[in-house]
Amino acid sequence: MLKKNILFLLACLCITTIALADHHITRGPDIGEIYFVGPTSTGEGIYHSTDFGETAVCVDSISEVISICADKTPGCLYRIRIPDALYFSSNYGNYGSWVFRHNDISAILSGIQGGWVFNGKASHSEDYGSNFIYHANNGYFGSLKSVEIGSRDSVGYALSHTAIPDSIYLLTSYDNFENLEIKYVFSWHWSHNISLSRGYEDGELYLYKTTVYEEEKELLYSNDYGESWELKNEFNCPNLPITSIVGGRQPGELYMVVPYIQLGYEIAHIYIYHSLDYGETFTVYHPFSHGPEPYVADFEVSPFSGASPLTVQFTDLSTGENIYSWEWDFDNDGEIDSYEQYPEYTYQDTGYYSVSLTINSMNTATRYNYIHVTGPNVIDEEGDHPEIILNNTPNPFHSETVISYSIPSNIREAEIEIYNIKGQCIRKFKIENEKWKINEVNWNCKDDRGRELGSGIYFCKLSIEKTYIIKKLMLIR
């Protein structure tokens, strides 16, 4: 089987978009043992692997699988099938071994003891799903986005949102969802797709988040029950369909399942991503393939930014057999700007531009806010200017950074602005220059309305008359 080692900070395998599923991969009781849901040559099925996903056997070709989870007991597997019906297998999920257990089960989570299975935060069973014990859920509020149990007895997590559009709450329980308390508030929109999975050690939690149109993808990690978070990866890829994640049974272990389908199952592949360093790097396995290599649109540009007018060279990196058409949209306005494979285009106006490439009229890659066109008097942050200084420490930072600047003594007024990756101004500082010296501004990682901002890349712009200088900032929550 195909095996690749790849670094994921800025590169990834790009494949056709599929909506995020809650639990389409689950750890088995043994190291290297996983079950996952993915395409077969004719539809969908459940696979079982004992070698970290390098090879896998389809144990049952079954459709409409919403979620699966493995029991701590060897060979025992649960699945939910539409409409919210729980089934149980004591024979590794093989065809003919499934037994109906219960109705009205919406989310299953594998317990840390044999025979224990959770119906989300609502209830749990201690007899392999035959009977359920209901939880009080004291302290819970809002609409549920994702739920997970911890690596030790009684710990549970729930992500929820309310009518406030830009706040998602992590609530943690230490008594099997009898009582929950707010542990962290993410400054994310309620529409973001989010998946949780516990890690190997107590208090470890992984969080995968993507926006609706997958402009941003982030993998975060916590080792203190969700009280603080570390950004582990940004999947800077046009179309990476991570359908589910799950922590493993070794320190730092994480799995991701990435299936895709093209041409009505004429092309169907499954990739398993396996990490032993908390999701910073992955080994990629290819346990199932059907048909030729997929059509995968991808590209790069040079340069990424510069002063107007900016001439950009576009390089096609797409893969697949017999690619015969390329449709470029240089400003993502829905209009085709070029049909060449390696076009060149000159941007006249300043701003951030999203770029799309469609190959063979069937697979599209979009890189959002990919090209930055500045005014003709912009000073590059890596350039040399003897009188203008812009810096910040620390960088990256977690909750606060000090922006230091120095401008010529004859300049009395200037302005510092903070922009997000979409080019939207989120914070402004009016500054005065009394005399020639290094001045400082403290930024508390909030916008002009006092709202906390999420992890990501931001830009600090120091404007002086008709000249400005830009500094890249990295916020990690």
Image: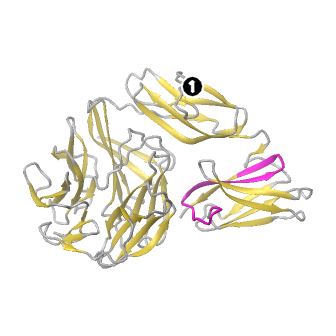
The residue lying furthest to the front in this view is 163
Q: Specify start and end residues of the magenta stretch as a single range.
A: 447-470
Front residue of this view, candidates 176 and 48: 176
Side (left or right) of 248 relative to 297: left
Q: Name the residue: 82% across, 49% down.
A: 385
Q: Position of residue 390 (x, y in %)?
A: 76, 57
Q: Quadrant of residue 173?
A: bottom left
Image height of 390 relative to 16, above or below: below
Front residue of this view, candidates 338 and 201: 338
Q: Amino acid at mark 1?
A: Asp
Element class at badge 1? loop
Q: Position of residue 328 (x, y in %)?
A: 53, 28
Q: Name the residue: 39% across, 67% down.
A: 142
Q: Position of residue 407 (x, y in %)?
A: 84, 57
The residue lying furthest to the left in this view is 96
Is residue 453 magenta-colored?
yes
**Residue beneath disc 1:** 337
